[in-house]
Image: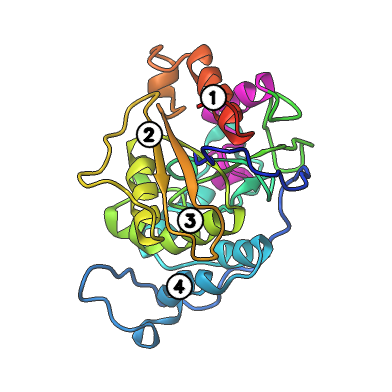
Amino acid sequence: MTDATGAPRQRRARRTATTPATSTTPATSTTAATTGGSSRPSDGALPDDARRPLLARDAATLDDLDALVVGCRACPRLVAWREEVAEVKRAAFRDETYWARPVPGFGDPQAGVLVVGLAPAAHGANRTGRMFTGDRSGDFLFASMHRTGFASQALSVRADDGLTLTGIRVTAPVRCAPPANAPTPAERRTCGPYLAREVELVDAGVMVVLGGFGWQAVLTTLAEQGWDVPRPRPAFGHGVEVRLRRPDAGRGRTELTLLGCFHVSQQNTFTGRLTPAMLDAVLERARVLAVGGEV
């Protein structure tokens, strides 16, 4: 959802990406806490689990970041829910072993387009361990990516199904499946450092934001990183396009574009609020912007 504007920039070497190698060992600490707001204690005063997201700031690579993500237990409500779902399984998946951990981003590590959703689905990514994989929302999204040339195949069934993404990456502001698909503001803040560091490491030129929750999370992250997010903040809407700039401080690109898109939830896709053609159009627009085309 970000893209350079103005003169085209030289493209970096592109490579495709499969599911990243991540640690499968959960954090051992059982203490959990979420913090936020002006009363937040210093990093050293936080319990180990609550401090873990803050370590994302020092992750040197996406692999380092993924290892932090999958071991996180910072939000007690989310930890309890993701693990309960893995025990009380949906009947269709009763013979499967659920991932039941936070889910890292997936796709091209040098993507020109970064897609930001909401959170993993309880019986989708929380089961398979890969973003937007194993549920109908993911089917809708990856089918569009395949039609628009970003994905090697239309289906995303499990983490080892051979799907690769080129020029695009998917992630979320909250990495654990939340009850009722509704993370709290505190949980979004706690998880925020993971999104912030992924945005920095990928350094995409275009960000496609799926839904209002992700839109607010992305604007908060970008404002904290020095981007010139307008006040009042731009409202979310399907097809909304926002161009941002920041001073050149040696931190990567200085221009990007946000594209708003209705979320690929069944509430939107089953009712026709979001159609395949609508999503295709957003992804095609993202591609044009990512390669420095006409604005």
Q: Earlier in the sequence, mark 1 or mark 4?
A: 4
Please name the residue shown 47% across and 27% down the image: 264
- Mark 4: which amino acid? Leu
Q: Which residue is mark 2?
A: 211
Question: Picture quarter containing residue 27?
Answer: bottom right
- Mark 3: which amino acid? Leu
**What is the image's colouring?**
rainbow
Q: What are the residue bounds of the magenta stretch?
A: 122-148
> Contact, CB < 8 Å: mark 3 with mark 4?
no
Q: Which residue is mark 4?
A: 54
Element marked by disc 3: helix
Q: Is residue 143 magenta?
A: yes
Q: CA distance from mark 2 to mark 4?
A: 26 Å
Q: Which residue is mark 3?
A: 195
Q: Earlier in the sequence, mark 2 or mark 3?
A: 3
Please name the residue shown 55% across and 74% down the image: 58
Please name the residue shown 50% across and 23% down the image: 282
Residue 36 x, y percent position in the rendering: 27, 68
- Mark nearest the camera among 1 and 2 is 1
Residue 102 appears in view: no
Q: Earlier in the sequence, mark 2 or mark 4?
A: 4
- Mark nearest the camera among 1 and 3 is 1
Please name the residue shown 63% across and 44% down the image: 128
Residue 19 appears in view: yes
Q: Earlier in the sequence, mark 1 or mark 3?
A: 3
Q: CA distance from mark 2 to mark 3?
A: 16 Å
